[in-house]
């Protein structure tokens, strides 16, 4: 974990404490962490509790205790101590410990890895125009905020098209609701749901509508159907299918995954880091109502998966016997497949095991 990673982790803990009403203070734009000075405790120290104490109306030691319990459970953090008037001191896990914790979390939580309760106190209502991109975006934002614990309803300006249901879109109400609402207004697609479904199908349509940021035009050409690596959607789904095929191949060879030595192989680092970032990406996408962040993230995971797969094959070849390295590589490949499936599911896109 780098100082930048640790800073983001502490800032995330502040966000959580505020969201959970444990702390009533403005969230700073950034949190500064520094190497512990000679004679100090831990690897890094942070004075954020002292910074927030005045606005929170609490002693700095109490703010530090609130933040400590939220930081201590994060992957990569070995120990968190409170020193002096309210400094937080961090001792980091060895990289291998953090990596195994991430793989264990993915294995235990499955496609729900990255879901949480940061927004559980929020009750939201999204309102969109009678337009296919607005409808699909609102539906996906609903999936994202629910994954972080929020309750949400969707309303539309007027009755929507019947084809929306074929894209997995549901609407709870029509007409302007008599409550505060959050408008969802991406740049329109320029086509109807029926036209897009007939030409592209549901999965490619959703990807084409969601992958660009909402303020950008959505490219909806036939390139979304290309069965090759030039098509990011195909690459993401193929990476997932390949990960599942590796599990089947390993079973045929009589071995299963075991997260261990993969963390020592250099080419694993980018993929491990992306898997560790997944919960933060989902929370940020939910907070900012930005499904495109999830699409870009699964693209990056797929790219890192193939780089790892090609340089560190998870299955033995020829007369080679399965080894501990193969079992650990397989664990990382399976975790990547799980994260890809979970991300695609939140986007409303299928993740076939065979492609």
Image: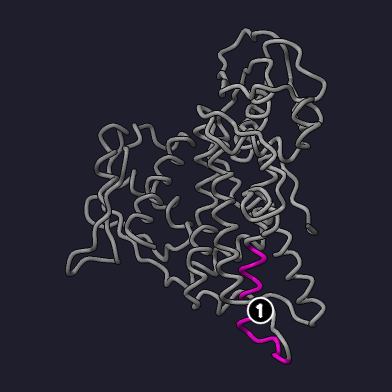
Q: Is residue 102 magenta?
A: no
Left or right, 277 with respect to 53, comes to right
Residue 311, picture quadrant: bottom right
Callout 1: SS: helix
Residue under the image location 26 percent in, 53 percent down: 87
Look at the picture and state if 237 lies above or below 38: above
Front residue of this view, candidates 141 and 210: 210
Q: Nearer the viewer, residue 204 or 23?
A: 204
Q: Quadrant of residue 348?
A: top right
Q: Residues within 10 Å of mark 1 (few under 14, many from 20)?
A: many
User: Magenta part of the protein: which range?
Assistant: 319-335
In the shown orientation, is residue 91 left or right of residue 54? Answer: right
Per the image, the residue denoted by label 1 is: 327
What residue do we see at 69% from left, 36% from top?
206
Q: Which residue extends farthest left?
A: 38
In-image side of 105 versus 23 (left or right) = right
């Amino acid at each position: 974990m780098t100082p930048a990673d640790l800073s983001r982790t502490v800032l995330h803990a502040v966000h959580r404490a505020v969201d959970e009403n444990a702390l009533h203070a403005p969230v700073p734009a950034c949190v500064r962490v520094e190497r512990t000075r000679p004679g100090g405790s831990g690897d890094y120290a942070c004075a954020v509790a002292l910074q927030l104490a005045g606005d929170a109306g609490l002693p700095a030691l109490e703010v530090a205790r609130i933040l400590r319990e939220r930081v201590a459970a994060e992957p990569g953090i070995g120990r968190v101590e409170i020193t002096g008037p309210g400094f937080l001191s961090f001792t980091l896990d060895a990289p291998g410990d953090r990596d195994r914790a991430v793989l264990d979390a993915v294995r235990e939580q499955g496609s729900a890895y990255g879901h949480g309760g940061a927004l559980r106190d929020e009750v939201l209502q999204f309102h969109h125009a009678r337009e296919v991109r607005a409808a699909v975006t609102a539906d996906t934002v609903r999936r994202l905020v629910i994954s972080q614990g929020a309750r949400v309803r969707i309303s539309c300006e007027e009755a929507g098209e019947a084809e929306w249901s074929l894209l997995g879109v549901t609407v709870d109400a029509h007409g302007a609701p008599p409550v505060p609402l959050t408008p969802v207004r991406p740049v329109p697609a320029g086509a109807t749901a029926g036209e897009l479904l007939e030409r592209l199908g549901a999965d490619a349509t959703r990807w084409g509508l969601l992958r660009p940021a909402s303020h950008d035009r959505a490219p909806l050409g036939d390139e979304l159907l290309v069965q090759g690596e030039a098509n990011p959607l195909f690459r993401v789904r193929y990476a997932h299918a390949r990960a599942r095929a590796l599990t089947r191949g390993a079973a045929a060879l009589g071995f299963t995954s075991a997260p261990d030595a993969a963390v020592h192989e250099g080419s694993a680092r980018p993929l491990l880091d992306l898997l560790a970032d997944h919960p933060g990406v989902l929370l940020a996408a939910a907070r900012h109502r930005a499904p495109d962040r999830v699409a870009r993230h699964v693209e990056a995971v797929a790219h890192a998966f193939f780089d790892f797969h090609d340089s560190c094959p998870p299955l033995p070849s020829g007369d080679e016997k399965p080894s501990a390295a193969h079992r650990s590589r397989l664990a990382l490949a399976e975790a990547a497949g799980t994260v890809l499936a979970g991300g695609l599911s939140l986007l409303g896109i299928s993740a076939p095991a065979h492609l």
